[in-house]
Amino acid sequence: MNGEKVALHGAQETLLITLCAKAGESRLPDSLLKDRFAAEALARIDYDFDRLKIDRDMMIGIALRAHVIDGWTRGFLEQYPESTVLHLGCGLDSRVFRIAPFAGVRWFDVDYPDVIALRHRLYPAREGYTLLPSSVTEPEWLDAVPQDRPAFIIAEGLLPYLPPEEVVLLLERVTNHLPGGELAFDAYSRLGLTLIAWQPSVRATGATLHWSLDDPEELLRQLPGLELVEELMGYGSGGYDPAQVARMSLVARMAVPVMGMIPALSRIGRLLRFRF
Ligand SMILES: C[S@@+](CC[C@H](N)C(=O)[O-])C[C@H]1O[C@@H](n2cnc3c(N)ncnc32)[C@H](O)[C@@H]1O
């Protein structure tokens, strides 16, 4: 194969899990995400994706998460056509192309320099779209982000990989830098983090997970400038479309309602949206 050779490890390599899942889900006849950009990028990468052991349930789960965040982003941009989007730990996610924002939107994708270099090779440039090569924990990259417009900040599949004190500092820094807006991310309880760390796909990358959130109130105490607007739990109680759960394997379809009834299991994973 003559594709882009990828030599990423640990947390960086996990971007191949989400890319592969989104591309795989997009090839299903009943696809929710329809992420042809992910499918095209994946086809150009020289990497043994089989080692990540991504099954159909995982494809649907990751596509669902991305679809919910896409919906939140679109909603915000409709309300604020002149705004800023910050996508932290963007990996090879193609949200900026899926959403194709209006000309008044300035969009920034941030990830490590190796990852941004790969993005440059796989995706085209776009008017109003800037790639920032940096660890999100370095404060300097924010200097490139103008402070004059409401902002939608996304951290999808990122925060669990950061040390807990860095998560709070990062969220404090980005929300203080911008005049106001919304912040969306996924968070997992301590039990959820243990279960993710045991997933064959994550184990294949050697990534280690650090930050967990058992209750969003913990974060609100640390960051009093945040206001919780929306909280979606797992696949069962409330948030996600049951039609999507119906696309999953028999085992998953049976497990999801049971998990929804057991408090510790119903709260292992959350999608959260805050106002700041
Ligand atoms: C699971 S992937 C998620 C990628 C993308 N958000 C998605 O949903 O497809 C985790 C991403 O976080 C990035 N990441 C982890 N720690 C980071 C840090 N300190 N600074 C910047 N990016 C980081 C990794 O490089 C990787 O792209």
Image (tube, rainbow, N blue to C red):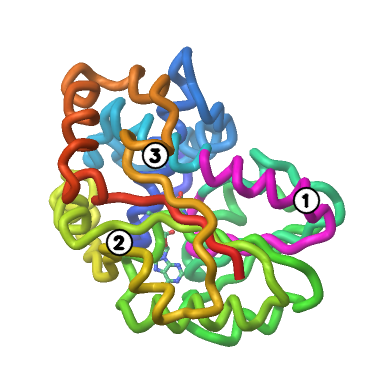
Q: Is residue 132 above or below residue 254?
A: below
Q: Amino acid at mark 2?
A: His
Q: Amino acid at mark 3?
A: Ile
Spatial separation of the CA atoms under disc 2 and disc 1: 39 Å
Q: Please identify the quarter of the rendering in which residue 151 is found.
A: bottom right
- Left or right of 123 on screen, residue 66: left
User: Mark 2 or mark 3, which is nearer to you?
Assistant: 3
Percent coordinates x, y for residue 222 in the rendering = 40, 81
Judge whether residue 117 can be spotted in this image: no
Q: Which mark is residue 273?
A: none
Magenta stretch: give its range. 68-92
Does mark 3 have its CB less than 8 Å from ligand 1?
Answer: yes
Q: Which residue position holds label 2?
A: 9
Query: Dot 2, crowdedness within 10 Å: few (<14), some or many (≥20)?
Result: few
User: What quarter of the picture does the C terminus occupy?
Assistant: bottom right
Q: Secondary structure at mark 1?
A: helix
Q: Is residue 1 above or below residue 168?
A: above
Q: Which residue position holds label 3?
A: 62
Q: Which mark is residue 79?
A: 1
x 49%, y 42%: residue? 66
Q: Secondary structure at mark 2?
A: loop
Percent coordinates x, y for residue 236 in the rendering = 31, 34
User: What quarter of the picture does the N terminus occupy?
Assistant: top left
In front: 105, or 45?
A: 105
Query: Dot 3, crowdedness within 10 Å: few (<14), some or many (≥20)?
Result: some
x 49%, y 26%: residue? 26
